[in-house]
Each structure stands twice: as C-alpha cells, then as structure tokens.
C-alpha cells in the first residue's frame, strides 16, 4: 500500500478526487514536470546558454526518488482536513518539498564528491559531462561543481516559487512557512555537523551520531513535513495533532537513517543507486560505526581502527564482517524496531481517520525495510 510510493495517481484535472494511499507521488511528479517545463522555458528565454544548467536541474528533480517528504506532508495534511478535501489547492506546497530535497541532494553530492545519485550521474558529474560534450573551455570538473552549486540554489528558489502557488489562505501559508523555514535551518545544521564529523570538539559517539540523524534526516524527512502538512490543513503548530506527528516523525525518521547506515555497508548498489561503503571511505560518523567502535575490544578494536584509518575500498568486505561481529549491525536492527514501535504507538494515540492511520503505519514499517 503506502510502501509503493511510486504508484500512479487517480487525481483528476480539477483535483476533486483525493489520492488513495500510496498515490500522491504520481500527482507530485506530474505537477513538478509541468512546473519545471514552464520554468525552464522562462530561463532559457533569457539566454540559450542556460540550457545546460536547466537540463541537468530538471534531470535531478525528475530522475526518480521516493517522494517521501511530499508523501508525509500529504498525510499530515490529510489527517488534519479529513478524507474528502480536494488535494489540488495544497499540492504545490507539497511538491515544493521535493525541490527543496533536490537542492539538498545536489549540494550533498558536491560536498561528498559522489559520482552517482539514484543510479545516474550526480549533478556535478552530469554538468561536467555536458562541458566535455559541448567542447567548452576550462576544467570540466570545476565547471561541474560550480554548476551544481547553482543548480542547488536554483532548486531552492523553485521550491519557494512553487509553494507560493498553493491556493490557501495567506495566514495558513505564513503559519506553515515558519515550520518550513525551521526545517531548512535544521537540515543545514545537521549537514554541517555531518561534514564536521570527527573534527567536532566533542568526540564522536553514538549520541552525537543520533543527534546528526535527528537534524539531518528525522526532522527534515518525516517530522517537519508531517507538521507542515498539518498546518497547511489548519492544525495548530503546537496542537495535539502536531505533537503526535512530531513523536511519530522523529521515531520514523531515526529508523530511516538507521536503515541508511545499514544500506551504506550491506546494500546492493544496483538497488540503492550509490556505491557501498562511501560513508566509511570518507570517515563519516554513523550510528552503526560508533556502535562498532564502542563494542570492539582487543584485536577487533585494533583491526577496526586500522581498517578505518586506511579507508581502502578493498577492505570493505572485512570491515562489514567486523561490524557484524561486534554486534553493531544487530543493535541497529533493534534500535530500528524500537523506533517503529514508538511510531505505531504515536499513530494509535492520535485522533486520525482509519485511512490516514493505516497509511502512516505502512510508511513507518517501510522506513525500516526498504532496500534503497
């Protein structure tokens, strides 16, 4: 049901038929495609040279993704307004979250020097390839990085422009914008702490890795989009529904990041769309890694330190096996189960209609079982 976030939509052109569980992604994709076609035409009308940047930007937005943030925002809204309200007036505000997410992904790939995203070239690599294909002067790699930074900025502007098209009272949009801005600030804070890594004044620990996960993933992916949707539906930002969504969202968001930690070591690159071991190769502090550091003793601790210091791709199978032997992977599984149980409890306690309750329960379960 809600685990299939790429399902097509049954929303009619006039927006009178609300989507069933799992179908919001199709509506968001269509909206984004229409919006970006118009925005691309306006930009290339300024100068044909902008086509390179605009083409790569559209590829990044429309080149796949689970549309999780707009899905959570939709169900946050749906839980506030009930089952019969048409989605068309609020849909631009939901779709804006996917443009914001693209901004974050593009900049993240630049900072991490990631070659791929969703199985395709990352924005800076795609722009560098266009530089070569067009025979432009200068260094393709530098052109690619600079273009990607601008693409991220462009997607941030596009997000604001799209959100402003929501057909909602101005007071509602202003109230929702406060939470939206806080979400952006927290995501930037979490990204910088992730970048800081072991250079932080506080030594790396499981607690610090969880703090980064809460800021960078839990708040930004689940909790804030849910509350954003609820406020778009007229709910109070500090009311009982928002509190229930925050409780649910932080639990599911942490489970989502914990699953990311496991996929980063044990996932299938053909499914995840990214090489295995990237975070370990960069020395990033994850909950999985910090648990292994805390649990490893004797020869295992020595071997773990040596493998992490070398950061050699050839060592990844041995490192993955070591993370398993320390019990860190099993502990991450347990932590995910605890958080999903907390999310189920939050849903059970909230005053929600049965369809919204079921959709949120399915999304929570999917967060800890996904393969990509």
Image: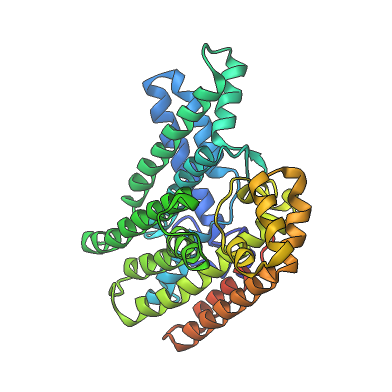
Asked where in the image residue 180 lies, by quadrant, the reply is bottom left
**Residue 12, x across and y down, in percent:** 51, 59
In this view, the residue in front, 283 or 182, is: 283
Picture quarter with the C terminus? bottom right
Q: Is residue 7 visible?
A: no
- Residue at (55% x, 35% y) in the render: 123
Q: Is residue 263 left or right of residue 253?
A: right
* Residue 354 percent across, percent down from the top left: 51, 84
**Looking at the image, how many numbered discs can be counted on the residues?**
0
Residue 319 shown left or right of residue 83 in the figure: right
Nearer the observer, 101 or 4: 101
Q: In terms of depth relative to the viewer, which is nearer, 16 or 323? A: 323
Q: Position of residue 23 (x, y in %)?
A: 57, 63
| Residue 52 relative to residue 280: left or right | left
**Residue lying furthest bottom in this view?**
349
From the viewer's perspective, tell me whether residue 229 is left or right of residue 327: left
- Mark yes or no: residue 188 visible: yes
Give the residue at x 56% y 20%. Answer: 140
Above or below, comparing residue 115 to residue 338 in the picture: above
Q: Is residue 288 above or below residue 278?
A: below
Question: Residue 31 appears at what percent x and percent y?
Answer: 47, 49
Q: Is 323 placed above or below 164 here?
A: below
Name which residue lies at 39% across and 66% down.
Answer: 229
The residue drawn where x is 66% and y is 69% is 328
């Amino acid at each position: 049901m809600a685990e299939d976030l790429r399902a097509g939509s049954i929303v009619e052109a006039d927006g009178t038929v609300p989507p069933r569980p799992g179908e919001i992604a199709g509506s968001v994709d269509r909206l984004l495609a229409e919006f970006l076609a118009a925005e691309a035409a306006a930009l290339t009308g300024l100068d044909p040279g902008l086509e390179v940047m605009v083409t790569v930007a559209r590829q990044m937005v429309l080149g796949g993704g689970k549309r999780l943030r707009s899905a959570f925002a939709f169900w946050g809204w749906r839980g506030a307004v009930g089952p019969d309200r048409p989605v068309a007036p609020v849909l631009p505000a939901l779709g804006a979250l996917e443009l914001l997410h693209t901004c974050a992904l593009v900049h993240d790939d630049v900072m991490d020097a990631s070659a791929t995203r969703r199985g395709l070239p990352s924005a800076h690599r795609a722009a560098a390839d266009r530089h070569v294909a067009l025979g432009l002067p200068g260094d393709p790699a530098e052109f690619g990085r600079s273009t990607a930074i601008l693409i991220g900025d462009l997607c941030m502007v596009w997000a604001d422009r799209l959100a402003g098209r929501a057909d909602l009272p101005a007071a509602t949009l202003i109230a929702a914008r406060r939470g939206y801005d806080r979400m952006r600030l927290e995501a930037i804070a979490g990204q910088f702490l992730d970048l800081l890594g072991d250079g932080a004044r506080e030594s790396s620990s499981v607690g610090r890795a969880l703090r980064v996960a809460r800021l960078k993933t839990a708040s930004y992916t689940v909790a804030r989009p849910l509350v954003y949707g609820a406020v778009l539906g007229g709910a109070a930002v500090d009311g009982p529904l928002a509190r229930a969504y925050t409780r649910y969202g932080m639990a599911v968001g942490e489970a989502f990041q914990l699953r990311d930690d496991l996929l980063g070591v044990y996932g299938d690159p053909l499914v995840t769309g990214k090489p295995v071991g990237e975070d370990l190769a960069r020395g990033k502090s994850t909950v999985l890694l910090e648990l292994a550091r805390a649990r490893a003793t004797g020869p295992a601790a020595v071997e773990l330190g040596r493998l992490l210091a070398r950061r050699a791709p050839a060592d990844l199978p041995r490192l993955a096996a070591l993370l398993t032997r320390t019990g860190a992977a099993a502990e991450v599984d347990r932590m995910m189960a605890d958080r999903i149980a907390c999310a189920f409890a939050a849903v059970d306690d909230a005053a929600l209609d049965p369809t919204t309750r079921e959709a949120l329960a399915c999304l929570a379960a999917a967060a800890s079982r996904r393969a990509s």
